[in-house]
Every structure is written in C-alpha cells, then in structure tokens.
Image (cartoon, grey):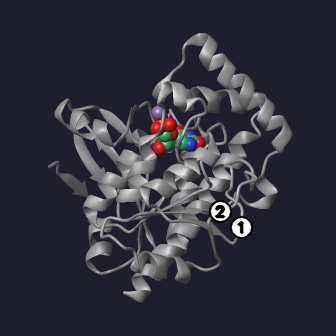
Amino acid sequence: MFDVRVSDEVATALSEGNAVVAMESTIFSHLGLPSPANEEALTRCESVVRAAGAVPAVTAVFGGVAQIGIDDASRERVCGPAKKMAERDIPVAIAQRWNYGATTVSAALALAERAGISVFATGGIGGVHRGSELTGDISADLDAIARRALVTVSAGAKAFLDLARTLEYLETAGAPVLGWKTDDFPAFYTRSSGLNVPHRVDSAEVVAAIYRNRTRNDQGLLLAVPIPESDALDVDHLDAVLTAALDECEAQGVRGAAITPFVLGRIAEATDGDSLPANLALAEHNAEVAAQVAVAICQAS
Ligand code: PSU
Ligand code: MN
C-alpha cells in the first residue's frame, strides 16, 4: 500500500482529536478554476474551515509523494498546472513521480481515509453521465463516496450529469444521501434539481449521529448542500448552455475525464463569468458546513 505524508498541523489535530476537513486539489488547480479565482477559492475555503474551528487538509501528489495538508510553500503548486488524478491513478502518480497529481473526489477520499479524517469538502461531485448507457461513463467518485468512511460535503452533482441516475446509483452503492436544510437534491449552480433528496437534515449534530451509526466501517455518506440563495444562477439559461456544451463534446470527440473541464469552461464563457463567483461561493459554503460537521463528530466522540 502507498504511503502518505501528513503535514505537522494536520497530524497534530488528528492526534489531539480535533476537527479536520479534507479537500480535493483538482478544484484549486488549473483544471478546476482559472487563475486567480482558484487561489481565491483556496484562501476562502481554508479560512472558513479555520474560522469554524477545524484544520483544512488539502490532498495532492507532489513529485510522487501523496500529501495530506500543505505548507505555505506548496500553495502556489496547488494552484498551478496539474494532471487529473482519480483514485485508480494514485499508484501510477506515485510510481511515475508525477510533478502534480491533483486529487478528484475519489482520490481525495482515498488519501483522507488513510489519514483517519472523517469529513471531506468539495464543490460538486462527479456522477452518472447523460448517455452513460452507451458510454459507460460513471464517475469513480460515486463508489468512493459510498465505501470510504467519510462524510462528503458537496453542492450536489455537476449539473450536466444525469442526476436521477446519479441518485439511483448512490442508493445501489449503499450511500445515505442527506439534504442540508433542504428536501431537494441541489444541482451545483442551482438550489434544486427538481429531485427529492432521500433524507433532510437540519443540524451538524444530526449528521454526526448518522455518521456514528453507519452500518459498515467503510460506509460513507453524501451531504448535499445547496448553493447560497444569493449566489445561485438562472436555471433556464444554464440548461441551454449545458446541452450545447455536451453536443459540442460529442462533435469534437471530447470524452471521459476531459468532459468536466471542457463543459465547465463553456459554462464560464456563456454565463459571462457569472459561474465563477457562484462556484467560489458554493465551495466556500460547503467547506464551512463540512467544518461544522467535523467539529460535531469530534465533540460527540
Ligand atoms: N466539479 C467541478 N469542478 C471539477 C470537478 C467537479 O465543478 O473540477 C472535478 C472533481 O474533482 C470531481 C471530478 O471529482 O471533477 C470528477 O471527474 P469525472 O467526472 O471525470 O470522474
Ligand atoms: Mn468519467
């Protein structure tokens, strides 16, 4: 099995039983957000986690070393060019000494579980893609969420996915899906996908209690947090942009792991940059809720 290097700050917090929130690095790299929005996202997410009484732990592979928690010198690297790294790529990234393997949700969960972290914050998760019955494209995020022993906090799944099938998949995989102060499954840039969430929760303490009562040591759960109302985007316009971007993927032969960065880029263009502040706001809000949950889990144990 691979080794991880845990930063001093994160290691101390874990050994003293204090709250830690793991984060992926793809969102902060060039793959997730353009500069300087990515640096702003990192700063804002880290600050809200700290303000809520938890320690942020960004995950990445640098120079072939899997890391949990970054020092100040590595911040620039986190926000730079990267290779997208899902869980299955971690052994390759280490063995081939990738300069910067940016963690997706599945990779971040694998690293975080290894360090014994209970809560993970991201922007939006991957899921079942539209047309997956033909392409087979189902994000490795879903299995990782279901079987890594962490609470994953996200603003729902990326809006251009097949959200109904994504929820079905999580049910099959055995992951509880919780709506944070909502009955609706959120859709990333918008507060509702029109689909119901299986269970609504209204406090971090309840999420902590659900986490404590999981049926398997390796059962994970998804906490879906809607984007703050004032930052949500207009639904109708977004639907048209998404459909056009997906058609374009098909026409240009953009497939697999390349689809997410491509579609996110098109959304940014089409919303005239409005999607960026929305993306930052939801990431920050997720990090804040994740920190509250991490603190509640620590207080109860
Ligand atoms: N959502 C975003 N931006 C992203 C991602 C999700 O708004 O960059 C990334 C996350 O790292 C997620 C990954 O884990 O996309 C899923 O990719 P795929 O669909 O190829 O599994
Ligand atoms: Mn995929």
Seen from the viewer's position, the closer of residues 227 and 288 is 227
Vertical position of residue 292 compared to residue 224: above or below: below
Across and down, in percent, residue 134 comes to: 52, 25
Instruction: Write down the residue under mark 1.
Output: 183
Q: Is residue 14 above or below residue 90?
A: below
Figure quadrant of residue 64: top left
Q: Is residue 193 left or right of residue 296?
A: right
Judge the density around disc 1: few (<14), some (14-19), many (≥20) Cα neighbours within 10 Å. some
- Horizontal side of 102 relative to 263 (left or right) equals left
Answer yes or no: is residue 124 visible.
no
Residue under the point 20% across and 29% down: 96
Q: Position of residue 259 (x, y in %)?
A: 55, 27
Q: Please give the residue where the numbered disc 2 appears in the rendered image.
A: 197
State the separation of the CA atoms marked 2 and 1: 6 Å
- Would you say residue 97 is visible in this rendering? yes
* Helix, strand or loop for disc 1: loop
Q: Position of residue 103 (x, y in %)?
A: 39, 43
**Residue at screen point 29% across, 32% down:** 99
Foreground of the two, 183 or 271:
183
Name the residue type under label 1: Asp
- The answer to whether marks 2 and 1 mark residues whose Cβ atoms lie closer than 8 Å is yes
